[in-house]
Image (spheres, helix red, strand yellow):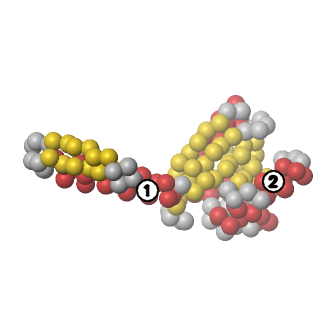
């Protein structure tokens, strides 16, 4: 990862970011990856300092390895073919949901950009629960139901028969 401007921009991002190199065995199979660069947000996200992770293989990072090491096939495909991918994953350690963008700016390397989507997942779950509650209420009514949009004062009338 070269370029002072690039490093300065990435180091100030709110999202955690790591730049990594795929490690292959003698048969050309991806077996690990090495951390080439991590930003400050990555350090805060993982609790692992830059000095303790950069230059190390994922298999050597015991506190973090289990979170993404199982995605080596995805990382290898992206790094080899220059494609992009996205992973959504719940992290038991931090009790958070993350969307992880995987991309490759050069062959053999890949970047990971982490976005915390816990609030979105929680809201989606809550909305699903509310929808189910509303469905159960309305399915058990044998009356006319009025729903009013409080901002427009527009009424919607539903006649429900069970």
Instruction: Determine crowd level at label 1: few under 14, some 14-19, many 20+ residues with C-alpha closer than 10 A.
Output: few
Q: How many marks?
A: 2
- For marks 2 and 1 on the same chain, the one whose residue lies earlier in the sequence: 2
Residue 32 location (% of width, % of height): 68, 48
Indicate the quadrant where residue 77 lies.
Answer: top right
Kindly give the residue lying farthest to the top in the view shown: 81
Indicate the quadrant where residue 109 lies.
Answer: top right
> Which quadrant: the C terminus?
top left
Q: Nearer the viewer, residue 14 or 66?
A: 14
Q: Nearer the viewer, residue 124 or 39?
A: 124
Q: CA distance from mark 2 to mark 1?
A: 31 Å
Residue 86 is left or right of residue 138, and the answer is: right
Q: Can residue 131 be seen by looking at this rendering?
A: no
Q: Which numbered dot is residue 6?
A: none
Rendered residue at 15%/42% (across/down): 159
Position of residue 90 relative to residue 72, above or below, is below
SS at mark 2 in the image? helix
Query: Do the residues under discs 2 and 1 have CB atoms within 8 angstroms?
Result: no
Rendered residue at 38%/49% (across/down): 152
Residue 38 location (% of width, % of height): 75, 57
Indicate the quadrant where residue 117 lies.
Answer: bottom right
Say which residue label 2 marks.
9
Residue 63 location (% of width, % of height): 62, 65
Rendered residue at 73%/39% (across/down): 104
Say which residue label 1 marks.
123
Position of residue 44 relative to residue 155, above or below, is below
Q: Can residue 95 be seen by looking at this rendering?
A: yes
SS at mark 1 in the image? helix
Kindly give the residue lying farthest to the right in the view shown: 4
Instruction: Determine crowd level at label 2: few under 14, some 14-19, many 20+ residues with C-alpha closer than 10 A.
Output: few
């Amino acid at each position: 990862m070269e370029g002072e401007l690039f490093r300065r921009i990435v180091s100030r991002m709110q999202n955690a970011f790591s730049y990594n190199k795929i490690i292959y065995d003698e048969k050309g199979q991806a077996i690990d990856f090495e951390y080439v660069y991590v930003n400050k947000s990555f350090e805060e996200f993982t609790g692992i300092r830059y000095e303790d992770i950069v230059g190390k293989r994922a298999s050597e990072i015991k506190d973090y390895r289990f979170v993404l090491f199982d995605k080596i096939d995805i990382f290898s495909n992206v790094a080899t073919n220059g494609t992009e991918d996205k992973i959504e994953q719940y992290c038991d350690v931090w009790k958070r949901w993350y969307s992880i963008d995987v991309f490759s700016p050069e062959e053999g390397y890949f970047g990971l950009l982490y976005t915390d989507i816990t609030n979105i997942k929680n809201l989606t779950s809550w909305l699903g629960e509310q929808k189910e509650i509303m469905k159960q209420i309305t399915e058990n009514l044998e009356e006319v139901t009025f729903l009013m949009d409080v901002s427009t004062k527009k009424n919607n009338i539903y006649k429900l028969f069970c």
